Image (cartoon, rainbow, N blue to C red):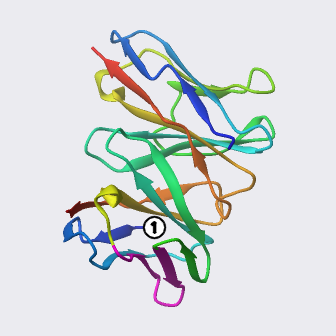
Amino acid sequence: KNEVEQSPQNLTAQEGEFITINCSYSVGISALHWLQQHPGGGIVSLFMLSSGKKKHGRLIATINIQEKHSSLHITASHPRDSAVYICAVGEYGNKLVFGAGTILRVKS
Amino acid sequence: EPEVTQTPSHQVTQMGQEVILRCVPISNHLYFYWYRQILGQKVEFLVSFYNNEISEKSEIFDDQFSVERPDGSNFTLKIRSTKLEDSAMYFCASSEGRVDYEQYFGPGTRLTVT
C-alpha cells in the first residue's frame, strides 16, 4: 500500500517568494498528480507527470522516480496562489492515493 | 472548456435514507471516478468505472454503495441507508485514460447526514 507524505503541512509566504512543496511516496507508481484545492472545495489538476519536469506559467513540477520524490515549485508567489496543494499517486491501476495536502497562504 | 458537472451541490438527508449523487463527465472521456473527502481529512478513492463496469474499488466501497451509468452522459453514485459517517464532500472525476492521464474533477457534492 502506497504511503504519500507531503511537507510542509502548512506554509506561509510573503508575496514574491519562491515556494517549494515536497511529496514522497513509498511504492513504485505509474504517474504522480499535483492538484490544487480552493477554499470552496473544488479540485483542479495542475500537473500529471511520470518523469522529469513540467512547467506551466509560474508553476514547476519535478519528479525523481529513483528517489520516489516530487516537488512543486511556485515562482513569484501571489496571494491568489493561496490554496491547498495535494499530491496524488497512481499505482498502475485505476486508483489514486492522496497525500494530506499542504495549506499555502501567501500574504501581500 | 469542457468540465465535469455534479448535482446537487449540497444534499442534506436523514440517517437511513438513500441518496443519489449525479455527475456528468466530460463527453469524450472513458474513465470515471468517485472520491470522497471527510471534513479535515485526505481525499479518498472510492471507485473507478470503465466500459460500463467497475474497474477498481476501495475497501470503503462496500455493499452500501453502487455506481451506474444509466445513459450516455450521467454517472451516478448511490448510497443506501446513509450513516452519519457518510457525511463528506463527494467528488466525481473523469479522464481519457487510466491513472497516467490527467483527471478532471467536478465541483463536488457536500452530503450532510443528520
Describe residue B48's horizontal placement relative to residue B86 as left or right: right
Where residue B71 sits in the image (x, y, percent)? 79, 21
- The structure residue drawn at horizontal position 77% and vertical position 45%, both measured from the top left corner, is B30
Residue at x 49%, y 17% (from the top left corner): B80
A62 within the magenta span: yes
SS label for mark 1: loop
Quadrant in which the N terminus of chain B is drawn: top right
Instruction: Kindly identify the amino acid type of the residue bearing the numbered disc 1.
Output: Asn
Is residue A100 in view? no
Q: Residue at x 39, y 67 (%)?
A: A4
Q: Is residue B91 left or right of residue A48?
A: left
Whether residue A77 is in magenta: the answer is: no
Magenta extent? A59-76
Main secondary-structure element of the magenta-colored stretch: strand
Give the quarter of the image for residue A8. Answer: bottom left
The part of the image, by quadrant, that contains residue A16 is bottom left
Most extreme residue toward the bottom is A66
Image location of residue A29, percent across then percent down: 57, 73
Quadrant position of the C terminus of chain B in the picture: top left
Query: Which residue has dot 1 on it?
Result: A2
In this picture, residue A23 sits left or right of residue A48:
left
Q: Is residue B53 above or below residue B58?
A: above
Position of residue B52 measured from the top left corner of the image (x, y, whole percent): 78, 34
Q: Is residue B10 above or below residue A47?
A: above
Residue nearest the observer in this picture, B49 or B12 = B12
Give how far across and how far down residue B65 sits, in percent.
53, 27
Q: Is residue B57 visible?
A: yes
Q: Chain of mark 1?
A: A
Mark 1 Cα-neighbour bin, 10 Å: few <14, some 14–19, many ≥20: some
